[in-house]
Image (tube, rainbow, N blue to C red):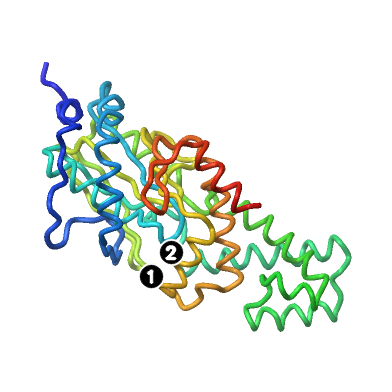
Amino acid sequence: MRKNPLAILAESASLWTPPAITGEIPHGDMPGDKVEIGQGHIDKANLIFPLLLPMAARAAEETGRVVICVCGGSGVGKSETASLLSHYFRQAGVGCYTLSGDNYPHRIPMYNDAERVRVFRVSGIQGMLEEKVYTQETGEALRQLWAQDADADPQRTKDFPWLEVYQRSGREALAQYLGTPLEQNYEELSAIIRRFKAGENALWLKRMGRTEDQRWYDCVDMSQVSVLVIEWTHGNSDYLQGVDIPVLLNSTPEETRAHRRSRNRDGKTDSPFTTMVLEIEQKELDSCAHKAKLIISKGGEVLSYEAYRAIMDSQEG
């Protein structure tokens, strides 16, 4: 019986040396995704790859195929690290494909952003009505805060005490939307994983751009692919089925904010609503972190779950 190439590669993991990175390498399948690989990403991938090999070989014993996810918060380097890991597998003679989970929300980014705001605001008003703090005056003040994009700012509760009710109710509802099947199509992606592991040699994979007419499917040849790498914030979610090896690239909330400030993403890096979304996503990542097979710190160190827990708990304190 022919030995699985992953098993052969794992046997020589201690002898593996990183290939040189020259020019661009293939990256995930998200249309328009910009991947800028730096030395920090290379250092993390060089640390992770030899640790992955024995895990991947064991996971692939039954089907000959393995699914790895690279997850983490905004700006932690998921796309870059996943691209490098896939490149290393291919350079070592193991077929690998990088799939971006950002192709699998129900709505394009513009409409999903709008839905997030709608959920927050509608539920916030409902909370005010239930706690009997909604009046003609508070409603008018709230509309002014909407116009300023300031209704999620906790500092404004000093001026408007009733806003605490609005923000608490809206945040609770938003947490029931973000990263759940209401927002993300876990069922479709889980079915793709099942078909991949079942040995299908061609898979129709979704592409999603930023406008409604930029949705389509490509038929991808998987006949020579043994490793599927999924890069996605929600790759370690309990809703996603079939992932063998979750790899968590960790960053503390402050590290995430600092990174976004440096990039000034979308021009609203420090908006109160964006900060709230990131905090909720961080809690989701944190709730699933115990399942990760590898946890890598922002500084590029392998963390045990206990060490990770100590770092994150100290941030909360």
Contact? badges 1 and 2 (CB < 8 Å): yes
In front: 223, or 264? 264
Regarding residue 100, the answer to whether it shows in the image is yes
- 118 relative to 304, above or below: below
Q: How many residues crowd mark 2 within 10 Å: few (<14), some (14–19), many (20+)?
A: some
Decide if residue 124 is on the left or right side of residue 68.
right
The residue under the point 18% across, 48% down is 87
Which x, y percent locates residue 302? 39, 41
Sequence-first tag of 1 and 2: 2
Which residue was labeled with disc 2? 108
Query: Which residue is situated farthest in the right direction here?
Result: 132
Residue 238 shows in this picture: no
Q: Nearer the viewer, residue 158 or 97?
A: 158
Tag 1: Cα neighbours inside 10 Å, few (<14), some, or many (≥20)?
A: few
Disc 1 designates what residue?
211
**Where's residue 81, x and y in %?**
30, 52
From the viewer's side, name the closer residue of 39 and 290: 39
Name above or below for residue 95 compared with residue 268: above
Which corner quadrant holds the N terminus? Answer: top left
Amino acid type of disc 1? Answer: Thr
Q: Residue at x 80, y 76 (%)?
A: 160
Tell me the kind of residue under disc 2. Answer: Ile
- Which quadrant of the view contains residue 198? top left
